[in-house]
C-alpha cells in the first residue's frame, strides 16, 4: 500500500479481475464511454480527495502506449486520466503508467494480484508477438 500514489486501472472489468496492481481501483474506459450506469459513482470524488491530500493518481492500462506509438490511437489510461481531470481531479495530480501493467510485470515488480502473464486487450501476448 502506497502513501504517495493511488492506482486507477482503465482496463475492462474482466481484465482487472484477471490481474491488477494490489489496492488499485477499477474504472474501465469502455464503461465511461458506453456503460456509465455501471460506474462506481464514489470513485471520482474519492480520487479528488486523495489528490487534494497530496497523492498522485496513476492511471494504468495493459501497455500505456501514447498516440505517437499507436498511429494516433490513445490508450485506455489516457481516456481515464482525461475523464478524471474533466470531473475535477487536478491535472498535476494525474499520471499515466508508461509501459503499462505489462512493463511492470516484465520488470518483475511486486504488487500484482492474479495472473502475471502479459496481456493486450484481453488476450495473452505470445513470445512471438513480443519478438516481432
Image (spheres, helix red, strand yellow):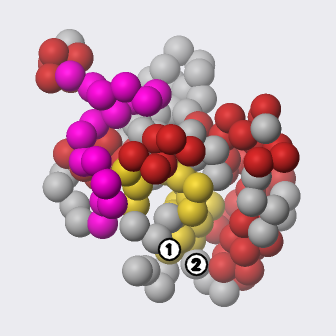
Mark 2 burial class by Cα count in 10 Å: few <14, some 14-19, many 20+: some
Q: Position of residue 34 (x, y in %)?
A: 79, 32
Mark number, residue 55:
2
User: The C terminus appears in which quarter of the rendering?
Assistant: top left
> Is any atom of residue 89 visible in this view?
no
Where residue 77 appears, x then y in whole percent?
57, 44
- Residue 117 lies in magenta, yes or no? yes
Do callouts 1 and 2 mark residues in contact (Cβ within 8 Å)?
yes
Of marks 1 and 2, which one's residue comes earlier in the chain?
1
Q: Which residue is mark 1?
A: 5
Residue located at (53% from left, 70% from top): 6
The dot on residue 42 is none
Q: Is residue 19 above or below residue 24?
A: above
Q: Is residue 29 above or below residue 121?
A: below
Q: Nearer the viewer, residue 32 or 98?
A: 32
x and y, in percent, of residue 115 in the image: 28, 48
Q: Give the alpha-carbon distance from disc 1 to disc 2, as whole Å.
A: 5 Å
Amino acid at each position: 500500500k502506497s502513501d504517495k500514489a493511488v492506482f486507477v486501472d482503465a482496463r475492462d472489468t474482466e481484465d482487472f479481475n484477471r490481474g491488477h496492481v494490489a489496492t488499485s481501483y477499477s474504472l474501465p474506459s469502455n464503461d465511461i464511454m458506453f456503460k456509465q450506469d455501471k460506474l462506481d459513482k464514489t470513485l471520482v470524488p474519492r480520487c479528488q480527495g486523495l489528490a487534494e491530500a497530496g497523492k498522485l493518481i496513476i492511471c494504468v492500462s495493459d501497455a500505456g502506449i501514447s498516440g505517437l506509438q499507436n498511429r494516433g490511437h490513445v490508450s485506455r489510461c489516457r481516456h481515464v486520466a482525461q475523464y478524471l481531470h474533466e470531473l475535477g481531479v487536478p491535472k498535476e495530480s494525474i499520471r499515466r503508467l508508461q509501459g503499462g501493467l505489462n512493463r511492470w510485470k516484465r520488470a518483475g515488480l511486486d504488487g500484482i494480484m492474479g495472473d502475471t502473464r502479459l496481456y493486450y486487450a484481453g488476450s495473452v501476448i505470445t513470445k512471438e508477438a513480443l519478438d516481432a
